Amino acid sequence: MPVLRSLLFAPGNHARRVAKALASEADAVILDLEDACPVAEKRATRAVVVEALQRVPRAALGYVRINALTTEFAYGDLLATVQAGVDGLILTKVESADQLRTADWLMSQLERERGLPVGGIDLLPLVETAKGFSALSEISRASRRVRRLAFGAGDFTTDLGITWSSSELELLKFRGDLVLASRAADLEPPIDLAWIRLDDNAGLTESIRWGRVLGFQGKLCIHPDHIAAINTAYTPTPEQVEKARRILEAFAEAEASGSAAIRVDGLMVDYPIVVQARRVLEAAQRISGRRPVAH
């Protein structure tokens, strides 16, 4: 599974925007059956998004955001979208481990019936309510199909009555909670909230910076113009890669001679720094291995 730096939403019922998203440089495209899809069109759009993911050549992974299990649409969404060509499902408003286990069980039965690899379709929970954050520990351990979590800040701030400011300082604690819960459950680093102020590029840069500082692996994205900045920020630079290599080479040499603490480029290097260097090289390798998806 590649690093997911940018995950671009597109309304599933809007053919032009779906096509544009699938042709973008996003690491993953999320065709939406939830908030961006009108209620009257949700059922008819299920087959449309699956057909688009099966038909359109793309480099991005293809996800479908389905409606919450508490809605009348979720069961039909699952039946329609567990199909060849769909790389993953985004389950919205996850509030308990039982919800994830239910979705996982049904997905597994559908995969078996349809001759698909069981567990092959990713399940990405969107945590976006007070109940969801209260159950983070259980949610993060509920399903082996789940590789990472994502933060849905729009519904979260609405649920708690939080004013979502341009600085996003009021959300730092909750973003940190998501990173902590993910690490404690041995999941991949989570996906950060989307930036909703489309004309504020300085704010976007700061939001991305905080995501990197806090330990996210990527960011939800609601506009194609944001993809380049997100991908760049979440990709190790050549200088970072070269420094990581120097650290690992120097440390291996030092360790072989009986030392576990050395100086590299003015930095004190011991085992935690070595782990960080390995992560940089692993991320660079996974990103460089991104290939077109053939369906």
Image (spheres, grey):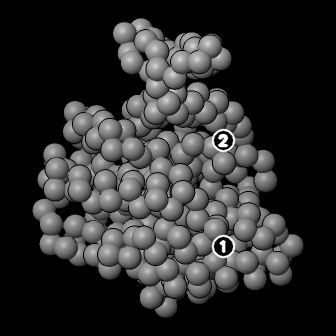
Residue type, numbered disc 2: Ala
The secondary element bearing badge 1 is classed as helix
Residue 103 versus residue 197 in the image, above or below: below
Q: Residue furthest bottom?
A: 72
Where residue 132 is drawn, which disc sits there?
none
Query: Which residue corresponds to the image point at 69% horizontal and 65% vertical from the top-left?
Result: 121
Residue type, numbered disc 1: Thr
Mark 2 highlights which residue? 59
Query: Which residue corresponds to the image point at 75% horizontal and 82% vertical from the top-left?
Result: 109
Q: Residue furthest top?
A: 265
**Image quadrant of residue 122?**
bottom right
Query: Which residue corresponds to the image point at 46% horizontal and 75% vertical from the top-left?
Result: 138
Q: Is residue 118 left or right of residue 216?
A: right
The secondary element bearing badge 2 is classed as loop
Q: Residue furthest front?
A: 258
Q: Is residue 105 left or right of residue 194?
A: right
Q: Nearer the viewer, residue 224 or 69?
A: 69
**Image quadrant of residue 164?**
bottom left
Give how far across and how far down residue 252 sits, in percent: 62, 18
Residue 211 versus residue 77 in the image, above or below: above
Mark yes or no: residue 190 visible: yes
Give how far across and how far down residue 221 sits, in percent: 41, 49
Give how far across and how far down residue 29 sits, in percent: 55, 52
Residue 232 versus residue 182 in the image, above or below: above
Mark yes or no: residue 33 visible: no
Q: Are marks 1 and 2 in contact (CB under 8 Å)?
A: no
Packing grade of label 2 (10 A; few <14, some 14-19, many >=20) is some
**Image quadrant of residue 155?**
bottom left
Give how far across and how far down residue 219 sits, in percent: 41, 47
Mark 1 highlights which residue? 81
